[in-house]
Amino acid sequence: MYGTKSKIDLAFEYQSQVSVLRPSIHSRRANLTVKFQDLYGFTVEGNVDDVNVLNEVREKVRQQGRVWWALEANKGANWYLHTTIGPGSALTSSLKFSALTNAITLKKLIRKGIPPVLRPKIWFSLSGAAKKKSTVPDSYYDDLTKAVEGKVTPATRQIDHDLPRTFPGHPWLDTPAGHAALRRVLVAYSFRDSDVGYCQGLNYVAALLLLVMKTEEDAFWMLAVLLENVLVNDCYTNNLSGCHVEQRVFKDLLAKKCPRIASHLEALEFDVSLVATEWFLCLFSKSLPSETTLRVWDVIFYEGAKVIFNVALAIFKMKEDELILTHHVGEVINILQLTTHHLFDPDDLLTVAFDKIGSMTTNTISKQRKKQEPEVMKELDQRIRRLNSLRSDANE
């Protein structure tokens, strides 16, 4: 996909992708709500101020793109792959320093955004998807899709039910061709990992991966590395135990990082999982504008699942003054939904996520998960016992 294009061709393609949005003169004068398509084909609804923000963001994307192209010209096309030093490495001091410099540069660059035209290649390399794909025969995905064609399982039935509800109205995803491609990816993965099978939420994640990666096979491997290496285990299994653990960890982190908000929400008896469950299961793809979502994913695929907590906390933090004045649960939900749907500038969100929320290590979050797991499993076990008891009573 990339080998046939020169850097100049890619640069021109990249510039053509990042178009300037121009609302009509009537919209500008009346400041009415306007609709337009974003970079990935989604219809966005907002006012002219939102359009202006998006145009500013796209100008920043162009500038960031020039930085990436300059680095490619300077360091080589795959310079970002030379950022680690293996144990027992015999590299010279200068090469080790170069790898360290590349790693620092790369982290900063990724937080500022990967250019859309480079995103598929960089995601595939840095996430571990390329390495995972290299461990199986080249025909693995094609063989798998052919082997499972026509098979019916509870997972395939749920996938078929969810296809028309996945980003309805999208010019490609909501077509027979889009549905067929998304179905093949989801069904193939449901057979690859029978423990996960299929869980609602994965349809949105896989759909966005298809739009970015351009090919079914690459989207499949990105989904595989996401579920098997990036995210916590059991997030998408039948009982969603991993997701329940994440929600408890998030609640604890909210109390630590945003104590005023947490205290007020507790007084309202507001359960953060009412909004955060969808954020975690869909990785913000149903909540944030697509271009903002993908900026978040840029960082997730490089830094790991801890980023989800940073971003979720940042959404609350950005609306702290409004949230502590709320009197009802409905008000809280409305504020958070309105905020996420209009977060058109990814830098606003990510600046809060990393500068104001502060760093959280993977080790710290892992300890929090281990602390919460026993209680979650106990509650799930009690729930199953109650359900079985009810069924037993109903059958008597």
Image: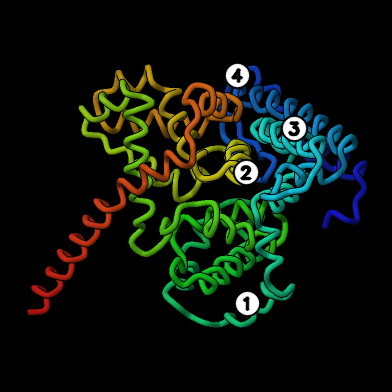
- Circle 2 packing at 10 Å, graded few (<14), some (14-19), many (20+), is many
Tell me what residue is drawn at x 73 percent, y 49 percent. 89
Point out the tag, 3 or 1, that comes first from the N-terminus: 3
Query: Where 207 falls versus 311 (above or below)?
Result: below
- Circle 1 packing at 10 Å, graded few (<14), some (14-19), many (20+), is some
**Residue under circle 3?**
101
Tell me what residue is drawn at x 70 percent, y 26 percent. 55
Question: What's the mark number on residue 30?
Answer: 4
Q: Which residue is at the front of the view, 133 or 296?
A: 133
Residue 392 lies in what quarter of the image?
A: bottom left
Q: Nearer the viewer, mark 2 or mark 3?
A: 3
Query: Where 102 falls versus 374 (above or below)?
Result: above
Secondary structure, mark 3, is: helix
**Residue under circle 2?**
302
- Scheme of image coloration: rainbow
Q: Nearer the viewer, mark 3 or mark 1?
A: 3
Whole-percent x, y for residue 395 in the image: 11, 78
Residue 23 visible at all: no
Question: What's the mark number on residue 356?
Answer: none
Q: Which residue is at the front of the view, 275 or 299?
A: 299
Whole-percent x, y for residue 185 in the image: 60, 66
Point out the tag, 1 or 2, that comes first from the N-terminus: 1
**Residue under circle 1?**
144
Horizontal side of 289 relative to 215 (left or right) equals left
Tell me what residue is drawn at x 72 percent, y 56 percent. 214
Horizontal side of 64 relative to 319 (left or right) equals right
Secondary structure, mark 2, is: helix
Q: Nearer the viewer, mark 4 or mark 2?
A: 2
**Between marks 2 and 3, how big is the CA–CA gap?**
16 Å
